[in-house]
Amino acid sequence: METAAFSPSLVKVLVAALSSFVLGGLWYGPLFARPWRRLAGLTDERLKAGSPAKIFGLSYLVAFVQAWVFAMFLGPRPSLALGLGAGFSAGLCWVGGALAINDLFERRQVALWAINASYQTLAFTLFGLILALWP
């Protein structure tokens, strides 16, 4: 018996990826901008360097790929519990764990990990919420 390959809804995934941008704007803006910048060693001069269009464009592309693959992982009709649980777990354990390993070797402060890992945990939880609730 053959089964059709699952392909996530493009619109659903685009919206899920966009949710990470909205969250990031709040997280790395009014909520944690000062401690994040200080802990990451980002000066005003360093933040002005580079192309914002390239940074935001590539970041959205990465968020889109994350949301697409996560949608493939969840399958066609995930329950709300699966979406939220898998999103939280993927964000904290997979992404947060990978960040922790890098931060340990780079001798970064735990507070920077906490800011970045909690953002990723919430971003993936939002992915799961959107992918589970969207018909």
Image (cartoon, rainbow, N blue to C red):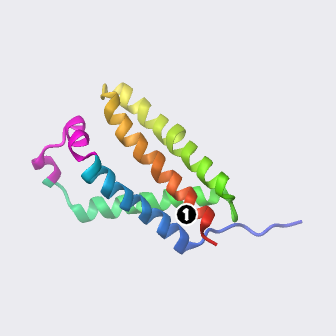
**Which quadrant: the C terminus?**
bottom right
Residue visible at 63% across and 59% down? 72
Principal secondary structure, stretch drawn in magenta: helix
Residue 69: in sight, yes or no?
no
Dot 1, crowdedness within 10 Å: few (<14), some or many (≥20)?
A: many
**Residue 87 appears at what percent x and percent y?**
56, 50
The quarter of the picture where residue 104 lies is: top left
Residue visible at 68% across and 60% down? 78
Residue type indicated by callout 1? Ile
Residue visible at 42% across and 58% down? 20
**Residue 116 appears at what percent x and percent y?**
37, 42
Q: Is residue 57 above or below residue 50?
A: below
Range covered by the magenta-colored residues = 32-47
Q: Was residue 42 drawn as part of the magenta stretch in this picture?
A: yes
From the viewer's perspective, is 93 left or right of 81?
A: left
Given residues 20 and 100, the one toward you in this image is 20
**Which quadrant: the N terminus?**
bottom right
Q: Which residue is mark 1?
A: 130
**Residue 134 appears at what percent x and percent y?**
60, 69
**Mark 1 falls on what kind of element?**
helix
Residue 35: in sight, yes or no?
yes
Q: Was residue 43 drawn as part of the magenta stretch in this picture?
A: yes
From the viewer's perspective, is 11 left or right of 77?
A: left
The quarter of the picture where residue 100 lies is: top left
**Residue 123 appears at what percent x and percent y?**
46, 53
From the viewer's perspective, is 126 left or right of 75?
A: left
Given residues 49 and 23, the one toward you in this image is 23
Residue visible at 81% across and 67% down? 3
Q: Of all residues shown, which one is farthest toward the left?
A: 45
The quarter of the picture where residue 114 lies is: top left
